[in-house]
Amino acid sequence: MKEKELQSLRFNNTSWEIFQLGEKCILLQAPNIQIEKIHESTRLIKTVLGNLITDIVPSYNSIALFYSTEKSSLIEKLETTKVTAEKKSKKIQRLEIPICYELGLDLADVAVHAGIGKEEVIKTHLSGVYRAILIGFTPGFIYMDGLDEQLACPRKENPRKFIEPGSVGIGGEQTGIYSLASPGGWNIIGRTPMPLFDPKQQPPMSIEVGSEVSYVRMSIKEFEAWGS
């Protein structure tokens, strides 16, 4: 982070500190903010700024804005635009994702750690409703909360060098999806054939931050037949 051209901004009933991250990127940060407010503010910023921003990246307590205009114009527009109830009324995306637990490389390990059988792990995981908190550490990796605390499991001491795309994992108290093949240290409990990230599409993600996700079980035969 470049130090330290610090400013402040009032937007969506929240006080944000502004940090310059690069020539055309600023970070809006609000310590102790609730994640729901981050997601709501992200949607509103998209609506207010439109094509003035080239990308927007929300995190746990901050939002990075990549822009194509002057920073002063960007901040002024955010400060002077009144956020109306109409603009706040966007519905939350809800998505069902198929998952094949037969491809869960670490399903047995998670079951042992939880002190229950594999089928109980599957039943518990299927009963949850999860929320996409943020997207990182690689393009398309989806971090989600909502995991039953019984299934929480530490990351692996020795990460794998290769994780198949679509792998669904547990890391600590979070669950996530490896949308692309990559190294990784999360416990893999299943895999989805549903493509979630395509850099050739706009937007490249088929799931957005703040979306609610539920899983639907599929067999290995259904997995292999997907898209055929």
Image (spheres, rainbow, N blue to C red):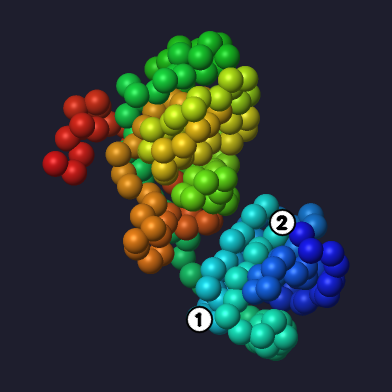
Which residue is the site of mark 2? 61
Residue 104 is left or right of residue 160, and the answer is left
The image quarter containing residue 201 is bottom left
In the picture, measured across the screen, residue 181 lies left or right of residue 133, that is left
In the image, is residue 199 above or below residue 227? below
Q: CA distance from mark 2 to mark 1?
A: 24 Å
The residue to which callout 1 is attached is 51
Question: 199 or 122, which lies in front?
Answer: 199
Q: Position of residue 60 (x, y in %)?
A: 67, 52
Q: Quadrant of the C terminus?
A: top left
Q: Residues within 10 Å of mark 1 (few under 14, many from 20)?
A: few
Q: Position of residue 218 (x, y in %)?
A: 27, 31
Under mark 1, the amino acid is Asn
Residue 94 versus residue 17 in the image, above or below: above
The answer, for residue 152, to whether it is visible in the render is: no
Residue 157 percent across, percent down from the top left: 62, 20
Q: Circle 1 — which element?
A: helix
Nearest the eye: 212 or 226: 226
Residue at the front extreme of this rendering: 23
Question: What residue is drawn where x is 66% and y is 85%?
Answer: 70
Q: Say which amino acid is labelled 2.
A: Asn
Q: What is the residue that sits farthest to the left in this orientation?
A: 228
Q: Residues within 10 Å of mark 2 (few under 14, many from 20)?
A: some
* Helix, strand or loop under label 2: loop
